[in-house]
Image (tube, grey):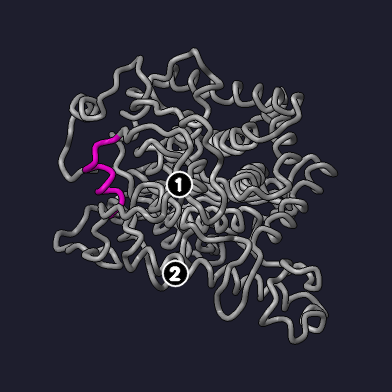
Amino acid sequence: MLGVALGIGVLLALVGCTATESCGEYQPPMENQERPRMGHRTMVTSRLLPVAPQAMVSQLLERLEASVNLEEAANPSVLLAMNLAGGDSDGPIHKWLLQEIKEEAVRRAQKGREGKEGRQQLLGDQASTCSWGAQPSCPLCPTDMTSGQVALHVLALLSSCQDPQRVHALEQTLDLIRVLQQKTDEEMAKLEAEGVPKTTLYSVGLDTLALCLAEAAGAQGPSVALAKQVLSPESHLSVDTRAMVALALSCVHDYVELQDVRELLREALRTVSNSFLDEQEKRNGMIGNIYSMGLALQALEATRKFYAPRKWDCAQAFSVVYAHDYQQPMAMAQVLPALVGSSYLDVAGLDCAATKDMSPSQQLPLFPKLGTHGVPRASIHVYYTITNTLQGKHFNYSTTVTVPRGSTLLRVMEVAAEENPQTFSFQTEQTFWGPYVTSIHGLAGSTDDRTYWHFLSAGNALEEGVGTYKPQDREHIQAVFSTY
């Protein structure tokens, strides 16, 4: 990750913490400090000193900025991570991300508004002047973004000291908080009626966190529902979901006044944080998989008071992160805040007036440089199976694909489709985590019936997406149509 192979012992020495110490020196807030209000951002949240070597943080920031592609949609998680990790806020990449995120929010809100029959007639000439939903005379503007996408935009704007209630772009002004409140209400309505949210509990956690940090109404109800989900014996939430929920509950806990609600949130936070510590102890530092470590580390930092006096072996946890060469932008964006002793809880308290010139973004190319490939790579054989026993006519097809060593699973699927399109054709959509397979053999996953294509190797779920996972020779990859 640093360009040279640093030993774990050296890295831990640079970090300066032992197996029994907390990561960095805890700095409690000064007395009589109030939570920052929008437009007056001075860091007042309790934070730790940076826990990773500065060279590592700088290297990841460089890599994250180099991943930005001007031909693709801006990723709010990248801007959020750059702000939390001290990226150059005056650099061209930061400025482009911020402007593009604001324009994307307005564009998609406008698209959603125009998609509703009669909405344009209702707005009339107000469309270019009113803050959709910000004034009583304006109907709330819908958007084709999911609640989680709206929440990420809110967090990215907050971390940039922008007011998400007045997002101005393309000669329009949008109240993104009102949109988020509406989206969250839709999630909660389905959760209460059917036991599952409209999208995922991870998104509900993200929604709750964004509403809380924006000091908007509507965070307490979802926080109670999320706490009950965490404490339910029938609940089997992923590490990512539990981590995001813990961040959200930690925010709400500090500001909720009802004692019974505070106790419920406290119990849920104790449960999540101790489960992470238990798993870390059993798995030599790993919590979930390498791609869930970023959020897990953020959650453990944010919930320290809920597992006290139990100690966190931070050296063990961070050694797992140091040993991995992060390349995927979303994974880097989630782990970077933890590496500087921060978390998403800090987005509303950043001092945007401070210039942190640690990111050489102005000298970086906007696109990663292509390497030379003069030496042909040896071929490998990958066994590939697609299976459906859930819907319609069941099927189970297998093939053997020959690809160059180091090829991604996506390339394996492309070769299979080229050789037998009638059987192995597939479709993808681009996400911030890379290409996401939506359909194989004409069968598409659906949020309505909660189905998706699940990828496994020798029966074990893959920890990477099809765009980054590289199968080994004679590995058996299975794509199984599944429910969640």
Magenta span includes 180: no
Q: Please, what is the three-letter code of the amino acid marked with disc 1?
A: Thr
Q: Nearer the viewer, residue 347 or 407?
A: 347
Mark carried by residue 72: 2
What is the crowding at mark 2: few (fewer than 14 residues within 10 Å), some, or many (at least 20)? few
The magenta stretch spans which residues?
A: 52-62
Q: Can you give x and y, in whole percent of width and height, for residue 95 in the image?
A: 39, 67
Q: Distance between the residues labelled 1 and 2?
A: 33 Å
Q: Can you give x and y, in whole percent of width and height, for residue 158 in the image?
A: 52, 54
Horizontally, residue 480 falls left or right of residue 11, namely: right
Looking at the image, the residue that sits furthest to the bottom is 125
Q: Nearer the viewer, residue 463 or 96?
A: 96
Q: Can you give x and y, in whole percent of width and height, for residue 151 in the image?
A: 60, 54
Q: Residue at x 72, y 39 (%)?
A: 220
Q: Quadrant of the rendered structure where residue 131 is?
A: bottom right
Quadrant containing the C terminus is top right
For residue 143, above or below residue 354: below
Residue 63 visible in the shown view: yes
Q: Which residue is drawn at 44% across and 44% down?
A: 334
Q: Is mark 2 on a helix, strand or loop?
A: loop
Q: Please, what is the three-letter code of the amino acid marked with disc 2?
A: Glu
Horizontally, residue 56 falls left or right of residue 305, namely: left
Q: Can you give x and y, in whole percent of width and height, for residue 81 in the image?
A: 41, 50
Q: Nearer the viewer, residue 411 or 436?
A: 436
Label located before the other in sequence (1 or 2): 1
Mark carried by residue 42: 1
